[in-house]
Image (spheres, rainbow, N blue to C red):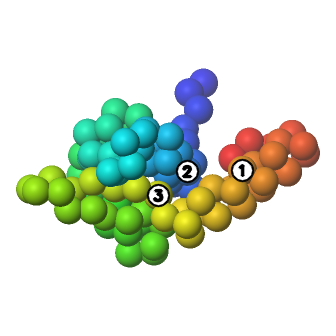
Amino acid sequence: MAQYRTQTKIIADILVTARDMNTAGDGVGITTLLRKGNVSYNRMTKLIADLVGAGLLEELMLEKNAKYKISERGITFLTAYNQFEDFAQSFGLRL
């Protein structure tokens, strides 16, 4: 049976991509987030808007393109998410 990701897991995947793929320090584009996040464009734009609004992602406007990088608040979220995921797995649960 297929395993579906929760909204929280998708958000964590987006934040991990924004953190790990930002090697040049100028953020990552939506195409990179789409490929690594594996969600549709419409859903990704909504998620990005929510994450920027919540302060988990920072939006950088470079020329005509928007780039995104993880914020300090996003790093804090990922740390707490990973701790909770480890805690849940210690009880045999999957998030």
Labelled disc at residue 82:
1
Gap between marks 2 and 3, in whole Å? Answer: 11 Å
Which mark's residue is nearer the viewer, 2 or 3?
3
Looking at this view, is 31 or 69 the one in front? Answer: 69
Q: Is 32 situated above or below 63?
A: above
Q: Is 84 situated above or below 5?
A: below
Q: Which residue is mark 3?
A: 70
Residue 7 spot, x, y in % from top left:
51, 54
Horizontally, residue 71 falls left or right of residue 84, namely: left
Q: Which residue is mark 2?
A: 12
Q: Residue at x 42, y 63 (%)?
A: 57
Residue 4 spot, x, y in % from top left:
54, 38
Q: Which of marks 3 and 1 precedes in the sequence?
A: 3
Q: State if disc 1 and disc 2 touch (CB < 8 Å).
A: yes
Q: Residues within 10 Å of mark 3 (few under 14, many from 20)?
A: many
**Residue 37 visible somewhere in the drawing:** no
Q: Residue at x 20, y 62 (%)?
A: 61
Horizontally, residue 65 falls left or right of residue 16, namely: left
Task: Label 2, secondary structure: give it.
Answer: helix
Horizontally, residue 25 falls left or right of residue 13, namely: left
In the image, what residue type sits under mark 3? Ile
Residue 53 spot, x, y in % from top left:
38, 75
